[in-house]
Amino acid sequence: MKLVRFMNNRAPSNKRYQPTEYEHAANCATHALWIIPSIVGGILLYLLSDDHWEEISAWLYGAGLSSLFIISTVFHTVSWKKSHLRSVEHCFHKCDRMVIYFFIAASYTPWLTLRDLGPWAAHMRWVVWVMASGGTAYVFFFHERFKVVELICYIAMGVFPALVILSMADRSGLCELLVGGGCYVLGMAFFKSDGIVPFAHAIWHLFVAMGAGIHYYAIWKYLYTPVNQPTSTAR
Ligand SMILES: [Zn+2]
């Protein structure tokens, strides 16, 4: 069958799926493509900033966005050309997982920082970074040991700050945030489909890029474009 060339067999539960050469190339390309746009996007938000908080948010968000694509591309490149680089690959796999926590925290930061929130909800501005650090520490010590716990951590990190965002008085941008979040959730189906769907991991990458793109658009439009400038006083 022709498909066989594009996809290997599913891996047993204790092993990682081994992508074909084509899949390796697609895994690298689908995230490498977004490195320059994410850096430029971060710089653009920084240039559009009117005050200190907008500048800080632009920095954190731009750094989170570009590191996600950079680390992922490096990891997939190393894992493609591994032969004698097993420990390096393992290290970058850890980094690839850790950066997701920081990416989630960074994606929420502009909303949590630049929008008016209630007195309790406002604490999510720093709680989200504590959660990201906790997730990172977890990956550092228990990487791939308890996959269910890892999944719960990612879901908690994605959902808890969203509850705060839903309670914002100014609800503009909420629709885009939900659609972007939906892209990540849909993509998860492919993340779990290595060996079932050819190029599953690369398709997951594309869903991530789409979700990130929609979220970037919302941040640019509702938080950094002058007409929609937030009137926050209590930051
Ligand atoms: Zn990947």
Image (tube, helix red, strand yellow):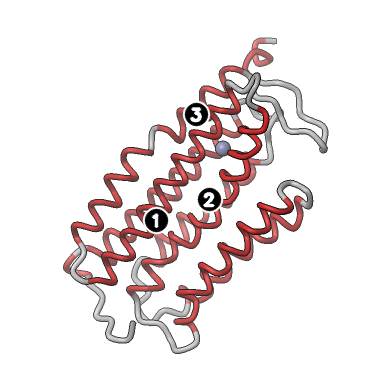
Q: Secondary structure at mark 1?
A: helix
- Tell me the CA gap for discs 3 and 2: 16 Å
Quadrant, the C terminus: bottom left
Asked whether, in this view, residue 210 is left or right of residue 78, the answer is: left
Disc 3 target residue: 28
- Quadrant for residue 79, please give it: top right
Amino acid tagged 3: Cys
- The x and y percentages for residue 209 are 44, 43
- Tell me the CA gap for discs 3 and 1: 22 Å
Amino acid tagged 1: His
Asked whether, in this view, residue 116 is left or right of residue 11, the answer is: left
Amino acid tagged 2: Val
- Crowding at dot 1, Cα within 10 Å, few <14 / some 14-19 / many 20+, comes out as many
Q: Give ligand 1's quarter of the image.
A: top right
Q: Nearer the viewer, residue 55 or 28?
A: 55
Q: Secondary structure at mark 2?
A: helix
Asked whether, in this view, residue 107 is left or right of residue 130, the answer is: left
Comparing labels 3 and 1, the label whose residue is closer to the camera: 3
Q: Secondary structure at mark 3?
A: helix
Disc 1 target residue: 215
Q: Specify the label residue 51 is tagged with.
A: none
Q: Is residue 123 above or below residue 74?
A: below
- Earlier along the polypeptide chain: callout 2 or callout 1? 2
Quadrant, the N terminus: top right
Q: Nearer the viewer, residue 221 or 153?
A: 153
- Crowding at dot 2, Cα within 10 Å, few <14 / some 14-19 / many 20+, comes out as many
* Residue drawn at point x = 62 percent, y = 32 percent: 89
Disc 2 target residue: 99
**Label 2 C-beta lies within 8 Å of the nearest ligand 1 atom:** no
- Crowding at dot 3, Cα within 10 Å, few <14 / some 14-19 / many 20+, comes out as many
Q: Residue furthest top?
A: 1
